[in-house]
Image (cartoon, rainbow, N blue to C red):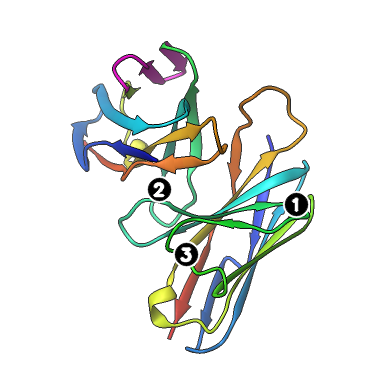
Amino acid sequence: GAVVSQHPSRVICKSGTSVKIECRSLDFQATTMFWYRQFPKQSLMLMATSNEGSKATYEQGVEKDKFLINHASLTLSTLTVTSAHPEDSSFYICSARDGLAGGPYNEQFFGPGTRLTVL
Amino acid sequence: GQSLEQPSEVTAVEGAIVQINCTYQTSGFYGLSWYQQHDGGAPTFLSYNALDGLEETGRFSSFLSRSDSYGYLLLQELQMKDSASYFCAGLSSNTGKLIFGQGTTLQVKP
């Protein structure tokens, strides 16, 4: 099956620093990638939709200047948490959709997630 | 917009059958997916219903009724390893986005 990787799997940083998280589709081309955030014991909340070669679309309430998304190729999207603060500590998960698969529904494949802890 | 509701917790014994319900309100609903997530892990895809009816995959089955805006996940022959959180997620035909329900924590007891 399709594989999505994320790097790093875990990161601890000081308040005020920026953290970059990479999401890669390993064996398929992902025209669309999605970024989610999950706080403990809560659901996955969609943050933004990333389309290759264009600007990301952010969900209501998500600060686009704080969460910078770049989708420069069909296999890589990055999320940069700028000036991170303790309240940004969360589990960040990306998913990717196979852009070449046929049919109106393309399954989303999830990465293993990145656990961010901001001290 | 979309919203999906499911029970927060369910407890069952090993070997039993459990049903996790999901009701949704959504515009441009295309289909209903189910995901399993163990503590500390990423969601893993279980099933997807685009049409009304039952989809069976091994011990897991999923059902959808569009007229009732309702679906469920049925887990049979429960095993201890099935203890996890289960999320229903609605797929929007307008945006292709998956919107997740709040999740149901399933605890399987011996």
Residue B15 seen from this side:
no
Which label sits in the foreground, 2 or 1? 1
Q: Nearer the viewer, residue B30 or B108?
A: B30
Which label sits in the foreground, 3 or 2? 3
Q: Residues within 10 Å of mark 3 (few under 14, many from 20)?
A: few
User: Dividing the picture into quarters, in which one does residue A76 lie?
Assistant: bottom right
Q: Magenta stretch?
A: B53-69
Across and down, in percent, residue B68 comes to 29, 17
| Residue type (three-letter) at the residue carrying disc 1 | Glu
| Residue type (three-letter) at the residue carrying disc 3 | Val
Q: Nearer the viewer, residue B68 or B34?
A: B68
- Chain holding disc 2: B
Q: Residue at x 54, y 30 (%)?
A: B93
Q: Are marks 3 and 1 on the same chain?
A: yes
Separation of residues labelled 3 and 1 (CA atoms): 20 Å
Q: Is residue B35 magenta?
A: no
Residue identified by numbered label 1: A52
Separation of residues labelled 2 and 1 (CA atoms): 30 Å
Name the mark on residue A62. 3
Mark 3 and mark 1 lie on one chain; the one further toward the N terminus is: 1
Across and down, in percent, residue A6 comes to 64, 59
Tell whether A25 sits left or right of B20. right
Q: Secondary structure at mark 3?
A: loop
Q: Residues within 10 Å of mark 1 (few under 14, many from 20)?
A: many
Q: Secondary structure at mark 1?
A: loop
Q: Is residue B66 magenta?
A: yes
